[in-house]
Amino acid sequence: MRKILAAVDESERAIHVVTKAVVLAHACSASVRVYHAVAVPQDFPAAAHTGARDLLPARLHDLAEEWL
């Protein structure tokens, strides 16, 4: 199976990237995966060295929902 990876950011042209990827995928019978990398917010220190619950996954999920 053919796959196309469309990497997007928060720019205005992200929608155009996804649109072009879908058109290309349709033309060559491929699937599309959209990848949006996010930076770790600076207000979240690394939690690996502590026993505290890591709140980062929930925060990143919230940010992703806001972006969508």
Image (cartoon, helix red, strand yellow):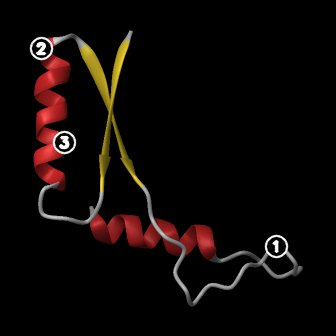
Q: In this rendering, would 60 be left or right of 7?
A: right
Q: Of marks 2 and 1, which one's residue comes earlier in the chain?
A: 2
| In the depicted structure, whether residue 41 falls above or below residue 23 | below
Q: Circle 3 is placed at which residue position?
A: 18
Gap in angstroms between the C-alphas marked 2 and 3: 14 Å
Residue depicted at x 54% and y 74%: 40
Which residue is located at x 40 percent, y 72 percent?
A: 63
As measured in the structure, the alpha-carbon distance from the residue carrying label 2 to the one carrying label 1 is 45 Å
Q: Which residue is mark 1?
A: 48
In this rendering, position of residue 13 left or right of residue 8: left
Residue 10's place in the image compared with 51, above or below, is above
Give the amino acid type for the residue marked by disc 3 in the picture: Val
Tag 3 secondary structure: helix
Question: Marks 3 and 1, how far apart in space?
Answer: 35 Å
Q: Position of residue 51 (x, y in %)?
A: 89, 79
The type of residue carrying mark 2 is Ala
Q: Residue at x 55, y 86 (%)?
A: 42
Label placed on residue 27: 2
Compared with 35, 12 (above or below) is: below
Please provide percent x and percent y for residue 54: 72, 75
Q: Quadrant of residue 21?
A: top left
